[in-house]
Amino acid sequence: MKNLHDVWRKRFLHYVNELQKYLKYVFTGHLAIVVVFVLGAGGYQYSEWLKTVPSDFPGTWLVATVIGVLLSFSMPTTLIREPDQVYLLPLETKLMTYMKKALSWTFWSQLFIVIVPFIVAIPLLSQVSKIQPKTLGLVFIIMLLLKWWNVQVEFAFRWANRGQGVWGDRIVRAFISIAVLASAFTMNPLYLLLLIIPIVFYFISWSRQLKGQPFPYEHFVKMEQNRMLRFYRFANYFTDVPHIQGSIHRRPWLNGLYRLVPSHQKNAQDYLVFRTFVRTDDTFYLWLRLTLLSAIGAAFIDIPIVVMIFVGALAFASAIQIKQALSASSEFRMDMLFPIAENARNNGILKLVRVVQVLQALIVLVTLVIVGVEQASLYALPIVVLIVSEITLRMSK
């Protein structure tokens, strides 16, 4: 490669191809239908809430706080790899040429995280807080400048401190961002001018500390590995990703549940499947997340048909993915040496999925009772969970 521009270009193309390879399995037609229904229900609920929100609602402070906190999360995407600790050492004096490309991509790729909440908040700011369009335009420009500042400062802070104390830095930047946005909403030029001082001082102070500091390859390599691992784990919910291996945790606080399986030879596979589900992070947290989403949807979506589709889709996802995850293991296991019926494991998996889906239905029911839902039709949601789960188990291979 001729220079660091070529290094970035080749790595960026590989990174984009890697994302596209798995995202095509994530954003399928089924997911699109669910997203459309959720966005439609959320938009309807939001518009209805705006009709009843009191005039003294602190909309500007709420929006400034949410966007300010989101701005503070500006983790740089450097695409640094482990061999760079050796091969890029001779070019370390020119490393900023590479990093400028990386920080530019970080800025543009993370803009949607703050632009989407800002667009969603425009009706609230216009109707309740009476913010004028020219003020919204000014706030939007300031928000972009703050995003650039947050990206630059977090990168400099991580370099200067080798990744230590990042949360303290984020808290400082979050408070500064919130104060700047709140001042912009109120069109207070004095406060804005005063806040420029800590912004410039904070940026210059950390930028100066980079001089003479060796680049912390270990920190940025680990950060890139963790970031890609999070993406692969997310994609693994929709398709098989060979890059990851499921992590295992004992979870001793759930040991008492194993007693629910009678201690008999015929229940050996039931016990092993149950233990595998509880201790495997991927399957256990997948079911937990989908169950919590079902409960949240049941609590906050008031349109019966929409919430039924939403909860039914999550019940389908829970049943099919847990069944496939537990059935996917094809390697040799010690239980294959024992005289157990060949279909015992499959029956144990079906039994486990039915049990956890009944638990999911009960959690949805308890949520409806706690929230005090008045529409009687919504109390059919637990039945929807059970029916969809059973149909999924019977129709899937």
Image (spheres, grey):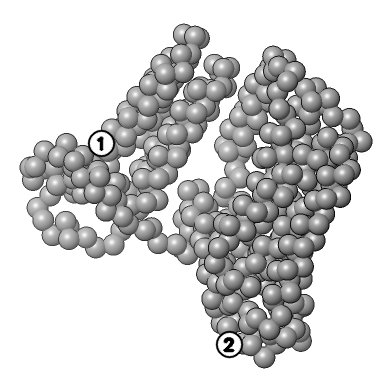
Residue depicted at x 25% and y 45%: 253
Spatial distance from mark 1 to mark 2, Cα to Cα? Answer: 53 Å
Q: Secondary structure at mark 2?
A: helix
Q: Please, what is the three-letter code of the amino acid marked with disc 2?
A: Val
Residue depicted at x 73% and y 62%: 202
Compared across the picture, whether 237 is left or right of 347 comes to: right
x, y percentage for residue 103? Answer: 73, 65
- Quarter of the rendering containing residue 316: top left
Q: Please, what is the three-letter code of the amino acid marked with disc 1?
A: Lys
Which residue was labeled with disc 2? 86
- Which one is closest to the eye, mark 1 or mark 2? 2
Compared across the picture, whether 164 is left or right of 16 comes to: left
x, y percentage for residue 198? Answer: 76, 57
Disc 1 + disc 2, Cβ < 8 Å: no
Compared across the picture, whether 118 is left or right of 222 comes to: right
Which residue was labeled with disc 1? 351
The image quadrant where one finds the N terminus is bottom right
Q: Considering only vertical position in the picture, is 367 above or below 120?
A: above
Residue depicted at x 69% and y 14%: 52
